[in-house]
Amino acid sequence: MTRQRSFKQLVRTRMAKTGESYTAARAVLLAGADPGGTGSSDAAAKPVLATSDATIRERTGRGWEEWFDLLDEWGAAEKSHRETARWVAGQLGVVPLAWNAQAVVGSYERARLGRAVGQHEDGFTVGVSRTIAVSAERLFDALVDETRRAAWLPDGKLTERTATRPASARFDWDGGPTRVHVVIDVRDAGRSRITVSHVRLPSADAATELKTFWRERLDVLKTRLEGGSDA
């Protein structure tokens, strides 16, 4: 198998669009600065790669070209998003919804499969994270306790499916087909990070709307918890 097949394909796509040399196009992509995605008009305004080569290497131990090689060799182009996320998470020793795993898989799928930002085989996904200066246990309780949750998420649209204290929970959303997955990670003493992924969304417009919604709700949660409220 030719090494860096998928990444070279990504570079050549940019070359055809911009007229840059291979070296120049590759440098822009590795810097995480390429403004031309694939798919929807929303995606076209965003980089294909989730972050720079330096950042993904710092976060995962590998750069983009190495990840694309590994995913090509594993056969990721023929796998579902869930299968690929689980495989990448296994390589990293994290849960599949962790930012590191999703950044790698999402970037590969946009470059290799031509998907829009946030698009998977079962619909669109949006993810929003906040680091909050409280323990993981307190953050978890603010999420799964219905009374506490109502203080920052008043619509009552979440129905719990599974929960593992204090690390994760999964919910149905508003009685429909979409799901909300939440992961909580300890950042350091007294700080935790919550990542909300809303999955199976029907369109890019719905994804944009829900991303704004979750940003606002997590900002309220952060303000309340750091201000001393239970939620």
Image (spheres, rainbow, N blue to C red):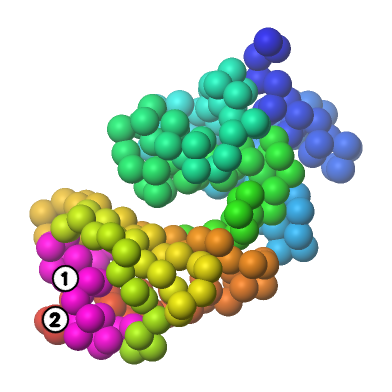
Residue underneath mark 2:
230
* Disc on res. 141: 1
Q: Reply above or below: 150 against 225.
A: below
Q: Residues within 10 Å of mark 1 (few under 14, many from 20)?
A: some
What residue do we see at 68% from left, 10% from top? 1
Residue type of the residue flagged with mark 1: Asp
What residue do we see at 64% from left, 31% from top? 78
Tally of numbered discs: 2
* Disc on res. 197: none
SS under mark 1 = helix
* Residue 118 percent across, percent down from the top left: 59, 56
* Residue 200 percent across, percent down from the top left: 55, 61
Residue type of the residue flagged with mark 2: Asp
Q: Reply above or below: 44 against 114.
A: below
Q: Are marks 1 and 2 in contact (CB under 8 Å)?
A: yes
What residue do we see at 27% from left, 86% from top? 150
